[in-house]
Structures are given as structure tokens and as C-alpha cells.
Image (cartoon, helix red, strand yellow):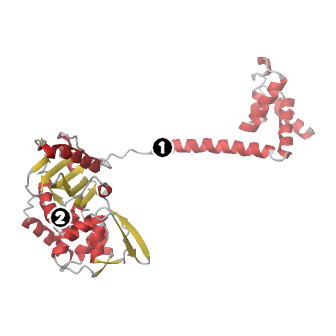
Amino acid sequence: MPAFEACCKAKESVADPGAPSVLKQGKSSLEVFHLSSYLVSVFGVTYTAVQLLGIPLKTFAAVLLSLSLLTALPGVATAGTADTKSKAKASSTRKVKSVVLRKQAVVPAVPTFGQTAGLHEVDDPLALKSSVAYVLDQNTNEVLFSKNPQAVLPIASITKLMTALVVVEAGLPMDEKLTVTEEDRDTEKSTGSRLAFGTTLTRGDMLHLALMSSENRASHALGRNYPGGLDAFVTAMNAKAQSLGMADTHYVEPTGLSSRNQSSASDLAKLVNVTSQVPLLRDLSTSREARVALGRRLVQFRSTNGLLSNPLWDIGLQKTGFINEAGKCLVMQARMAGRQLIMEFLDSSGRASRIADAERMRKWLASTLPGEAAAPSAKL
């Protein structure tokens, strides 16, 4: 302690004589002691800083002595120190988090082709989030609902319906083994896949995953293994579209990842009409889930359309789609009020908006079809 007092006296000699004194403000010696203890233990204040507050040397020395004695007691100082460190760490973490949040840039959403064209500005009686909606009686060709039916837009994975139709009509063996290769990598959007390069599946399994789970590598592998290769397959897709009278439709690849795969609602109704009459495509597209052997593992794949699990829907064929340029898309053939209907929702904005739009349409049709009320229409 003598050495400590000598050190303190040396510091006291250079102290600012005009420094404010807490004692002059009416503080008792006990209060000053507690104040000094708090400053030292919590904030790590040195004697020089305490001296500027006017706390006497002896009081400060007593504080240090008390703290040193507390440190020797088991569990006391350790707990206090840990608590202090915890508070400091929490404070530091809060500061870091706040800095990170301030540095985050707001990235504007990429507009869809429909948004750029102003299609979402067209109102409709059901206040749909889809800029394009179309409902057609499959048997009578009566249009029950129409909103921007001729607008030509990217169709994303709705493309896979044409891919599947071309594969089936080619009469290629469904049990033939196909292998996913580097050629099936997504060079459009750099998306991943659960089908690793080297995965071997039957053509039937590839078709199943393409329609049910919208597997892009499976769809690309189907096109690549077509007689004549991928170019011949895309040519066949466009030839089939032309034969169906789909004048607004053009394909450049079999997955839908390219925004250059485009069509209109009126054209897609023709595609849905034909594909819904192929039993295999009906079964595969409406399958809710499947376990597929990928090497030594059994991997669970599920449908991208949650409406298949809804008992209020009787869906005969369906396909979903999404890329940024196309928005959320959904086409279906469904039975409602005793009628076979083709229903389409394109360029929908919002995560679950296409499903919500389909539900709005179902409820409206349920109340309209029995009475054959006039169908609402929204025009460009």
C-alpha cells in the first residue's frame, strides 16, 4: 500500500486544482465511496479521471482495496466481471447490428414485362393481382372471364407443358435411362437443382419431375435427348405451337428460364386443351409428391401447386411458373359446377397471389355458373 500511496500522491500533485468536487455538492463520504466503486468496477475509470471529479485520494485507494478483496472471494468478482463483459458484449453487438442495418441497400424489384407494359393498371371486377386472367369453358369455348387475353408475355415454366407434349407425341420410350450432364446447367438464371450432374433417371421420371416439381435440369435433359438434339427439339416445340394455331407463341428452350419463351392467354388455352386430353400428362402434372431414387438416396419431390391438396378443387391438369420477367403464373384445367374449365393467371405479383387469384375466381364462378350470370370482362 505505501507504494500505491506514493503513486497516488504523485498524481495528486498534477491534479487540476479547479476540478469540480462531488463533496462540495453535499455528497457524504459513503456516497462518494459507492460512486467511486461504481466508476471503477463498471466503467474501468482510472484515478486521473476520478480525481477530476473531486474524489479524494484515500477514498479512491479504499475502493481499489475493496475491489481487490472482492476478487479474492470465490464467485463474487468472477460473476461481476462476467456480467460486465456480457453487458459490454451485448452493447457491442447492438452497435454492430445497427451499423449493418444502416449499410443495407434497398434493391428495387425488377419489373415484370406486364408491369412495364402497364397491364397491371387494367382494373377487373375481382381485383386480381394477375395482369392476365382467362377462363374458358373447354367444351363450348365460351369465355367466362377475360383480362388482357392477347397480351404476349414470358410464360416461365408453363413452357414445360409444351416440352411434355412434344416428348409424349414423339413416342420415345419412357423407361429409357437419361443422364443429367453439364449441358443441362442453367445458363439463363444460374439456378440450382436437386438433380446433380451424373444423375440417371428414366425418361418417365424426368417427365414427372418436370411437370410436378418444375425441375429445370430434367426438362432440359428431355429436350437434349430428343432425336436430333436440343435444336431439333425447340424446332418441334414451335412447329407444334403453329399447328395448334398458337400465333402469339415462340419458344427458344424447353425449361421456361428464358424470358424469350412467350405466349398469350388465348394461345395457352389451346395448349392446355390439348395436353389435358393426354392421360399421362394429366396424371404426372397433378401428382402431389413422389420419392425418387437419386443414387443411394430416396429423395422426396413435391408439387409446386398447393391447390392440389385443396378438396374444393377438382384439377385435371396444371402447371405453375415463375421467373422475374414473367411474374407468378398458373394454368389449369379444372371441373367446376359440372363444367370443364380452362383457367389461366399470368404475371401475378406477390408470393401467393396466383393461388389467391384462383380462389377468388373459384368463388366467383361458384356463384355465377349456376345462374349463368354475365361474365365480367376487363379490356386493354
Q: Which mark is residue 276?
A: 2
Q: Is residue 304 above or below residue 106?
A: below
Question: Can residue 254 be seen here?
Answer: no
State which quarter of the image contains the C terminus.
Answer: top left
Residue ID at (21%, 46%): 361
Query: Residue 205 location, x and y as percent?
Result: 30, 74
Q: Nearer the viewer, residue 324 or 99?
A: 324
Residue 164: x and y in percent read 21, 69
Placement of 360 over or under 139, stated as above or below: above
Three-letter amino acid code of the residue under disc 2: Ser
Residue 188, given in percent of the width and then of the height, sits at: 28, 63
Asked which quadrant contains residue 30, the reply is: top right
| Residue of label 1 | 101
Residue 22 seen in the current view: yes
Under circle 2, the secondary element is loop
Q: Is residue 240 above or below residue 338?
A: below
